[in-house]
Amino acid sequence: MDTNPFAGHVDRRPEVAPPEAAQLLRDAFGVAGSLTELGSHQDRNYRVDVADGAAAGRRRYVFKIARGGLGRAALEAENAAMLRAASAGLPFEVPVPQEARDGSLIAHAVVAAGTAHHLRLVTYLEGSPLDTFGYLAPSVLHAHGEMAAGMTLALEGFDHAGLDRVLQWDIRHAASVVEALLPYCSTPARRALAEQAAGRATEALASLEAKLRVRVVHQDVTDVNTVARADRAGRPMPCGLIDFGDLSRTWLAADLAVVIAADSFHALDAPLQLARDVARGYLALVPLEPAELAAVWPMVVSRAAAVAVSGDQQGALEPDNTYVHATRAEEWAAFEAVAAVPFALAEEVLREAAGLGPSRRVTLPADAVRPVDVAANRVRVLDLSTTSGALSGAATGDTAAVEAAVNAVRVKGGIPLGRWGEARLTDAELDTTIEAATVHLGADLFLSGGMVVRAPVAGVVRHTPAGVVIGVGSFDIRLDGVVPSVAAGVGVDAGDEIGRVSGDGPGGLPALLHAQVVAVPGLEAPRRTVPSLARAWQALCPDPAELLGLAGPLVVAPTDDPAALLARRNAVLAGVQIHYYDAPPRIERGWRHHLIDTTGRSYIDVVNNVAILGHSHPAVEAAVTRQLRLLNTNSRFLYGVMTEFAEALAARFPALLDTVFLVNTGSEAVELALRLARVATGRLDVLAVRGAYHGWTGAADAITSSHIDNARAAGTRPDWVRLVEAPNTYRGPHRGAVAGALYAADVQRVLGELAAAGRGPAAFIAEPLFGNAGGVVLPDGYLREAYADVRAAGGLAIADEVQTGYARLGHHQWAFEQQGVVPDVVTVAKAAGNGVAVGAVVTTRAIADAFAAEGSFFSSVGGSPVGCAAGLAVLETIDREGLQANARIVGDRLRDGLREVAAAHPGIVGAVHGMGLYLGVELVRSPETLEPATEEALAICERMRELGVITQPTGDGNNVLKVKPPLCLTRDSADVVVEVLERTLAEGW
Ligand SMILES: Cc1ncc(COP(=O)(O)O)c(C=O)c1O
């Protein structure tokens, strides 16, 4: 006889067609409306749209026809729970049962198949089911965890006789369900996985069961049952919970497990990180006890297994249930993902979410010996961290760099030691959308091959491809890099020789002994892990200082806490000196167009127009270092590099622009340019483009009217500033071939106003490509006409090339070339020193000489030897490395790729602006109104950062993603940027 209640258990959906259902609804509830079938595993549910007339609007319900076998008491329990939750003041909605014509909440009917069914009508919750969204941001997961906890709290003390039943979805029965339904698994591999994983989970739960609290819980807070509405940033925030059909008196922690199991499909490659976010939300409201935390993952696996095998069963029984078929692949994928996670690791992750420390301690026996005989006082830290001075560049995967660093320690007689807990630069990866495993869980002693290795403690030897493991019983000691001399399975005593250090290190590294303590016997711990799981893995692989007989500070890498640094920064620096991101990564290293944070996560940097050659360029480093050793002083002395730099810079401009002033920053350059114009013309007034940014100093700030930099700008400019309409062909009033002339007409209008007031312009200043609007190319003819009109009125034309110059446009060296004009004065900075403060004003000899009327010009460090050495190196490197051509080729490719993404997402991408490697992706809420997608842009930047791309919004609506990377950007990296944007927009953010 079959003792498993779930074996052969078949619940088919009631056979009720829509017209019949509509009739039942009218008869039982007196409600008429149009019916739309909603998906369900075992019941028949219809959404009912009731037309109440225009004034009352539409009302919506869900008409639920319960499956045949379902007793009335269970439905009464559900109804009671819904009513309880509805009145509990929860921050989300639940369905509310409606009265039937006879005043009851449950009607009864015999339908076509001759079976009696219970009928209910509940309110419909507006929103979209959470499962229809791809990516769920940490804040969404947190809210989902809170929702489950809120439901648990609302049901505190609730009970009902209708819950005295054996429910297939009660998590306590998951193992029996899996066992009973195994024959339905559609492939042998699925069957094997279900059997094995559910078996492990059952075993784990059996050992914890006595400590698990039992309560009445909803037990079905899944993404499918959660209704979400987009917040301002477009993130789907949970706002409603439906389906009380799995309400059970079961393990309290089930609600948390169910959310994690269901949501894990949204992060198949990172189920633990997802679980931690959910758990943080849940545990803040419902703290779980340590045993319950340990039980959560086995419950997650049980639940996922039960869902997956039930899907296969339902699919086999109901080949026409499209809802079941659509979700099966997802359910199996989620199950596989959660089943692959070691329970012990998940436990540590959940403890971390609960604010608890490691669950296990490893105590070495008193007779432990060192595995190798090295003089402790000769051991030296081999710094392989991201801030290591021993490594240069990115050093990712660079075994030669490690070897050189090892040798540098050895020549001084030291024994190099790679630290435990260190995020190593050498393990970082570039151009990747996922985290690399950078954090080391053991310590590495770089030794000579052939050295004797001894068993540090008594235990049983196991062989691994990398070396040996000593199984101690309550923990393991893993020693990689050992050629074993003792057979596997042999017991050894502390001090017994077990092998020798292998002559070859792993992956081409020098010979080393990797020592790792693993607190769970038999656990296959990796040598290194991703930063987001480092804390949990470190709890399982505690530091091996004692094992090696070395001091903790030598073996344990210092921990880095970016949040603490941010707090210090905020405490000492002015709050208005802003920083990127709410929780910024700590960036201490840059290489080419990559930034690497202190966890070893690399990012493609598309925001950095200062490091035009790429970060940490060796040519700049060499030039600056050399110059610092020789001389660095003020610019009143005669030294060669000042002239050389000025000559090289001037040579890049049209012949008339032959005279250079050297300063430090863009603001200074703009300040000086305005002063030159005023002195040369004897006038005061300056025409500037509305919404532009030109710097923070007095006059540069005065002509800046960018709203995002200063919300009060429009109303507070001094009266000598004359703003002209922004020549923005995307947002402004004019488009097409005549746009240039029409925008230039506004310059003429302002000039006319000035003339009418008896005044004349000193200058007209504009970026020749509208940077602050996100890289908008100016309409053809705009600057030509504007310059002609300004000059005709006696003013000078100033091109602010602080952002746009230095070959960034690829097709042009200077942005003014794109407009076919030659300005009278040009300002440069930012890129000019690749991050070293260098700025310049380039103008005609006559204009420069006119300054004499105001005395002389002197900027102490402007034009300093070091600044000039950097400036010269930048110009030479742009030529030597062909960076302008690269900006053109890679920039065009990037622009085309971004435009393809834009075409695929017209609901959010309004336009891709720019040229070369000065691009901007403008995000809008509607292609008609062009309402800036401000909050969305920030959220999208967060998600893109998670995927390894650093960008930030700009523009007056803070809605244009900046794409202005170092000019060394490669095609591959450009393709990753496109891929990341596409993925972000496709999956959500
Ligand atoms: C167009 C333009 N001009 C001038 C400046 C001011 O340059 P700096 O920040 O070096 O003072 C900036 C800075 O963003 C700029 O974008």
Image (cartoon, grey):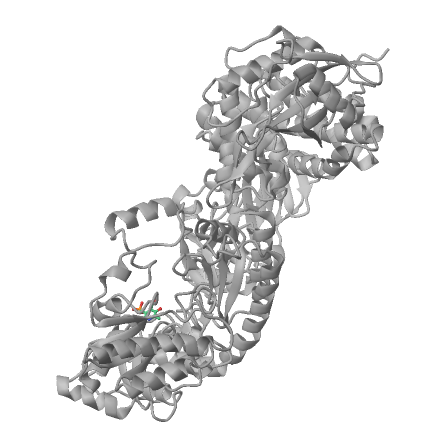
Q: Is residue 912 above or below residue 206?
A: below
Residue 701, placed above or below residue 216: below
- Percent x, y of residue 592: 48, 68
Residue 737 x, y percent position in the rendering: 51, 77
Q: Residue 201: give x, y in percent of width and height.
A: 67, 25
Residue toward you, 596 or 965: 965
**Observer-nearest residue: 304 or 820?**
820
Instruction: State which quarter of the image contains the N terminus.
Output: top right
Q: In the image, is residue 701 above or below residue 178?
A: below
Asked if residue 837 can be seen in this view, the reply is: no
Depth check: give the residue in front, 911 or 337.
Answer: 911
Q: State the residue at coordinates (47%, 18%).
A: 88
| Image quadrant assignment for residue 265 | top right
886 sits left or right of 564 in the view: right
- Ligand 1: give its quadrant: bottom left
For this rendering, which residue is in front, 599 or 778? 778
Q: Is residue 175 above or below residue 596?
A: above
Total marks shown come to 0
Confirm whether residue 221 shows in the render: yes
Q: Quadrant of residue 263?
A: top right
Q: Where is residue 545 in the image (x, y as percent from the top left)?
A: 46, 41
Considering every residue shown, the one lying at the far top of the view is: 161
